[in-house]
Amino acid sequence: MKFIKHLQENESVTSYCQVRSKQAKLKKNGELYLRLVLGDSSGRIEGKLWENIEEVQEGIQAGDFVKYQGVVQVYNGSKQLILKRIRKALPERDSEDDFDVEDLIPCTEYDIEEMWQKLHSLVLQQTSRPCIVQLLTNVLNDNEEQIKSYPAGVEIHHDYWGGFLEHVLSVVESALFFADKYPDLDKDLLIAGAVLHDIGKLEELSGAQNPSYTARGRLIGHVVMGRDLLRREAARIPEFPERLLMLLEHLILSHQGQLEWGSPRRPKLPEALILHYIDDLDAKLNRLCRVRKEDPGDSDFTAFDRYLGRVVFKGKYDEPSEHQLLASISQ
Ligand SMILES: [Fe+2]
Ligand SMILES: [Fe+2]
C-alpha cells in the first residue's frame, strides 16, 4: 500500500484509496472527464480520469474503496493523480494484496474507548444538578455509536473517524479549566454546553465513513438541530428547570459566536462567551496543526489555507547551533 502522503512527482503508482467525491466535468473539446478527490489515512489528492469514464461514472460512488493505477503530476503547485485505471476494491481478493480499510480512513490518534470513558466520568464527577447529570448521561448513552465514530465536520476541523468525540472532550476539558479559574461561573451550565454544543452534527452529517451534509443539515444546520434535540431530551426529564433550559439553549444557539458564522444569537452570558472561544480555539488549533503536518512543501511556510485565511509557519523554532551549521556546511 502506497500512502498518498508519500507520492512523488512523476511516480507511477498502483495502490488503494477511498473516493471522497466524484464530479463529471467538461474538457475544452466538449467531452466529459472525471475529477475525483481521493483519500487515505495519510491525506487526500485530486485525481483526474480523462478517458473511458463511463464505467467509473456508473460503477464507483463517493465513499467507495478503490484500487487505482496512475501517475503523479504537479499542476499549479499541487500534486494530482492522472488515473489510468480504477476499480472497486474487493476485500476478499485484495486483502491478500495489502488492502486494509483502516489504512484508507483518517482516524483520531487517540484511543476512542479511553476518550469515551473520560467524557462519561467528567460528566458524573464535575456536574452537580441531578437534572444535568441525567440529561447528559441520556444524550451520551442514546447516541454512543455515533458519538464514538462521527467526525466533527466534513472538512474544516476534526474531520476524521472519532473526531467528534475528540473535539467534544477537548472542549469539556477546557471548560473545566475555566470553571476552576472563574469560580463564579455556573459549572454545570458550562460543562453541559460543552458536551452538547455540537450534538446537532449527529443529524447534520450523513455518517462516519464518508460524511456529507444531509438535506436537513443544509436546511436547518447543527446549531438549531442541537437546540431541538436539547428540548426533546429535557422534556424526558420530569420538571427540568425552565430557566436552566433556556440558558442552555442560549449556549447552543450562540456557540458559533457571530451571526455570520451561523449563530442566531451572539453570546450573552459569561458561560456562553467562554464556550464560544474554547470551541473556536479547539477547532482552529486542530486545523492549524493538521495544515502544518500535511503540507508537502519544503519551505518554512505552508501553502495558503483558505479556512484559516493565512499561511502557517512550520519551520524550526530554535536557531541551529554553530555545531549543526558547521556539520551541514561540511556535508
Ligand atoms: Fe458548532
Ligand atoms: Fe464545536
Image (tube, rainbow, N blue to C red):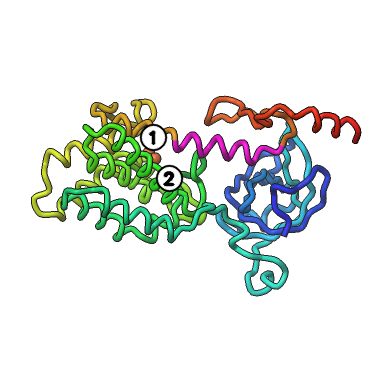
Q: Is residue 242 visible in the rendered structure shown here?
A: yes
Residue at the extreme front: 323
Please state if 253 lies on the left or on the right of 74 as rendered: left
- Given residues 137 and 15, the one toward you in this image is 137
Residue 229 part of the magenta-drawn span: no
Q: Secondary structure at mark 2?
A: helix
Q: Secondary structure at mark 1?
A: helix
Q: Which residue is mark 1?
A: 278
Horizontal and vertical percent position of residue 116:
39, 57
Mark 1: amino acid:
Ile
Q: Which residue is mark 2?
A: 167
Mark 2: amino acid:
His
Task: Give how far apart the Cα atoms at labels 2 and 1 are.
Answer: 10 Å
In the image, residue 177 sits, relative to residue 52, either above or below, namely above
Q: Which mark is residue 212?
A: none
Horizontal and vertical percent position of residue 220:
32, 40
In the image, residue 114 sits, relative to residue 303, either above or below, namely below
The residue at 68%/31% (across/down) is 316
